[in-house]
Amino acid sequence: MDGNGRWARQRNLPRTAGHRAGVRSVRAVVEESVRLGIRALTLFAFSSENWRRPRSEVGVLMELFMSTLRAELRRMAENGVRLRIIGDRAAFPEKLQQRIAEAEEITYGNDRLVLQVAANYGGRWDLAAAARRLATEVAAGTLTAEAIDEAAVTARLAFADLPDPDLFIRTGGEQRLSNFLLWQCAYSELYFTALMWPDFGVDAYRLALEDFARRQRRFGLTGEQLRAESETD
Ligand code: FPP
């Protein structure tokens, strides 16, 4: 969700006004995902590097997470949305951690859309944590080094129970992953748009999904092999 700060600056507003406007896009994209039957959506809300921003901006972001969680809980319940936070939540204010745990518990049984918010998340942090878990298990004798394969790594990442993302969307014009879901995005289709996140609404989201629908995902096969496979289906 990139471009909140620039969106605000273009309007002579403080950067934080961009984050507030960004919440509207979050709501629009979440609701459209539910309507379209998308089963999992992950939003990158706060990276491990974002702590380096001015204290006041970090403070506003924390407050926005708190107030949005409070305000949206009922709507999430009505829409069948299950909320999960991925990332190192221990660094968040105690109250926010509590609110996150409550929201996860209340929405646990909802099964239309899993909404993951990556907060204090980094793809390398995720991989390092998985490596630590594997090493601990090997040291304890419950796992052998030879048994460590791709599935073993995947199973120890932040969201082992969900499939890899089909589509990665980045707003704000930059064309890089910025330490998002590094392992999980190995085969994801990448979509970059120059729109700033607060301008990314339902129409822009649909355009991204239509673009995705036109792509041919080969997963290492040739186009001919794929056509042959779909003919035998
Ligand atoms: C990146 O834009 C955006 C963020 C660091 C924060 C995203 C947060 C929200 C949209 C608020 C609410 C989210 C939830 C899930 C309740 P930027 O500030 O890096 O923009 P810039 O590149 O233009 O400076």
Image (cartoon, rainbow, N blue to C red):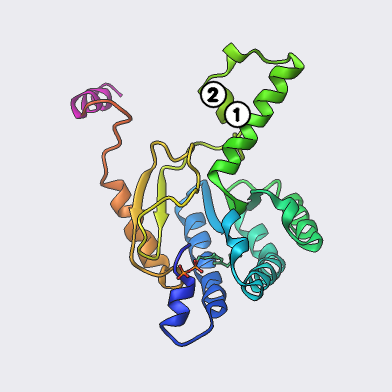
Locate the C terminus by quadrant. Answer: top left
Would you say 106 lies left or right of 151 here?
right
Residue 46, above or below 16: above
Is label 2 in contact with label 1 (beta carbons under 8 Å)?
yes
Q: How many marks?
A: 2
Residue 46, above or below 127: below
Tell which of 73 and 87 is nearer to you: 87
> Does 229 appear in magenta?
yes
> Does 199 appear in magenta?
no
**Which residue is at a point 57% across and 77% down the rendered structure image?**
16
The residue pinned by badge 2 equals 151
The residue pinned by badge 1 equals 155
How packed mark 2 is, by other alpha carbons closer than 10 Å (few <14, some 14-19, many 20 or more), is: few
* Percent x, y of residue 140: 76, 18
Disc 1 is placed on an element classified as loop
Q: For the magenta stretch, what is the residue range? A: 223-233
**Which residue is at a point 33% across and 30% down the rendered structure image?**
219
Mark number for residue 196?
none
Report which quarter residue 20 is drawn in.
bottom right
